[in-house]
Amino acid sequence: MSQVQHSAKRIVLAARPVGEPKSSDFRLEEFAVPTPGAGDVLLRTIWLSLDPYMRGRMSDGPSYAAPVPVGGVMEGEAVSEVAASNNPDFAKGDIVRARTGWQTHAISNGKGLIKVDPKLGPISTSIGVLGMPGMTAYTGLLDIGKPQAGETVVVAGASGAVGSAVGQIAKIKGARAVGIAGGKDKCDYVVKELGFDACIDHRDPDLAAKLKDACPKGIDVYFENVGGAVFEAVFPLLNPFARVPVCGLIAHYNDTEAKPPKWAASMMRATLTKRLTFRGFIVSDFASRHGDFLRDMSGWVRDGKVKYKEFVTDGLESAPGAFMGLLKGANFGKQLVRVGPDKA
């Protein structure tokens, strides 16, 4: 690690992908570790979060956020150590969360840096169950889904960072939780470890029939992370007044053209006659709820009511491969990259 003191690394967007991202869409660069100026801090990255939304940042189509420019550092949130500080608000050794991207070192003027409290849990959880993914689950389910005791909540991507939290929160609120995940191992984990009532393998050719069997009273809340064939299996089972928080559509992120479903007209009719609520959201929509989230989620994690799993690769160089695997469901839990040593 002695070289890190003199040389830093970053991964930049080399080309905009067409369809699935490939290795040549990323480029690893070396650069000199920057020196902080007046009011600045030098950050050393410890943990990097990889999330599906990053696929959207690689494209230049219309979106809620600006794309990563070709040649720019890949977008991402990280947990970092303050390696040097000329800012009175931050001391050397402080652990912070910041959107520094895919790089080993970064300079910050302190704006947007959030100190991480190691007493709440391992610092990696600040970009996992106690960070953006956890808050996405918390606000999307509680503020949009609004599950009631006895209702049935279905969540796609149930073994992932967001989906796993959604189902566990649903159980805390007295609802029945049914997960959809990829493969027997993930489904077993969702039921046996996380306490979901059932989990269906989305690769099963009888997905629609098995989901119907698992939801004999229909579906009251569907937390959408996937789209595609999973949504098609869910939609006919939605009860009157069902709520659908739309968090992600990972099945479509590599699409090269938009194709409306053949049954769009019948979907609109059902939305009308069943009085369904669909709402897309971005976690920042609920920024004012962060205090409530951190209080509740940290308590649930501490009490063992919410469990989490981390899927870790080592070294910044592993990020492109791990990200491409994430889009295919290769991860099992929250996808993280251990960029540097975690002294905490």
Image (cartoon, helix red, strand yellow):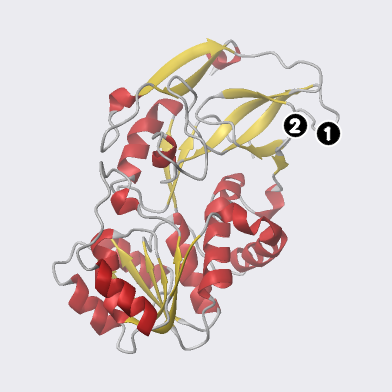
Q: Residue furthest left?
A: 205
Label 1 sits on a secondary structure element that is loop
Tell me the quarter of the picture where residue 157 sits. Answer: bottom left
Toward the viewer: 177 or 270? 270
Q: Position of residue 323 (x, y in %)?
A: 37, 38
Q: Quadrant of the C terminus?
A: top right
The amino acid type found where label 1 is placed reads Asp
- Name which residue lies at 48% across and 82% down: 175
Asked whether the viewer can see residue 3, the reply is: yes
- Left or right of 17? Residue 224 is right
- Name which residue lies at 45% across and 23% down: 11
Among numbered discs 2 and 1, the one appearing first in the sequence: 1
The amino acid type found where label 2 is placed reads Gly
Residue 89 is labelled as 1
Tell me the quarter of the picture where residue 163 sits. Answer: bottom left
Q: Position of residue 246 (x, y in %)?
A: 44, 62
Mark 2 or 1: the one toward you: 2
Residue 23 is labelled as none
Q: Is residue 149 above or below residue 57?
A: below
- Name which residue lies at 58% across and 70% down: 143
Q: Residues within 10 Å of mark 2 (few under 14, many from 20)?
A: some
Mark 2 vs 1: CB contact within 8 A: yes
Q: Residues within 10 Å of mark 1 (few under 14, many from 20)?
A: few
Q: CA distance from mark 2 to mark 1?
A: 8 Å
Q: Position of residue 48 (x, y in %)?
A: 51, 37
Asked whether the viewer can see residue 305, the reply is: no
Q: Is residue 98 above or below residue 329?
A: above
Q: Which residue is mark 2?
A: 110
Label 2 sits on a secondary structure element that is loop
